[in-house]
Image: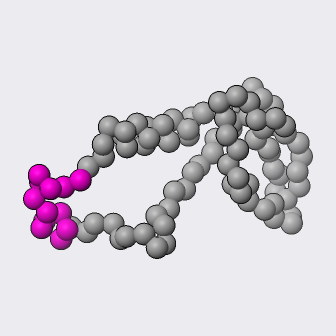
């Protein structure tokens, strides 16, 4: 199926189908499909700040989301209620 304008393929995002699942066909384009995105920190990334970090960091020195960061978070949140064409239904 061709990717519609304004959408992007998520390379490697489709997990392998378990052997006991059977592909039964594409989802009706008018059907709403719920998806869950689980975002994880990078394994080699820095640890999240703990309570002691916040105690030792003056309020004026704390880093919070910028307006651009907040727009990104909002956009990611909106993805959860977006219809994704070409989704496939699995039975199993």
Residue 65 visible in the shown view: yes
Image: 25 above or below 41: above
Foreground residue among 59 and 24: 59
Indicate the quadrant where residue 32 lies: top right
Q: Quadrant of the N terminus?
A: top right
Q: Quadrant of the C terminus?
A: bottom right
Residue 31 visible in the shown view: no
Give the image location of residue 49, x and y in percent: 28, 66
Image: 71 above or below 57: above
**In the orientation shown, which residue stands out farthest toward the bottom?**
44
Indicate the quadrant where residue 13 lies: bottom right
Q: Main secondary structure of the magenta part?
A: helix
Residue occupying image coordinates x 67% and y 35%: 7
The residue segment tinted magenta is 52-63
Give the image location of residue 37, x and y in percent: 57, 51
Foreground residue among 11 and 77: 11
């Amino acid at each position: 199926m061709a990717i519609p304008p304004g959408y992007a393929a998520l390379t490697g995002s489709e997990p392998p189908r378990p052997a006991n699942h059977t592909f039964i066909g594409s989802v009706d384009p008018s059907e709403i499909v719920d998806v869950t995105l689980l975002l994880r920190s990078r394994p080699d990334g820095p640890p999240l700040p703990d309570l002691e970090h916040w105690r030792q960091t003056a309020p004026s020195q704390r880093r919070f989301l910028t307006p651009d960061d907040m727009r990104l978070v909002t956009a990611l949140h909106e993805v959860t209620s977006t219809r994704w064409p070409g989704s496939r239904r699995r039975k199993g």
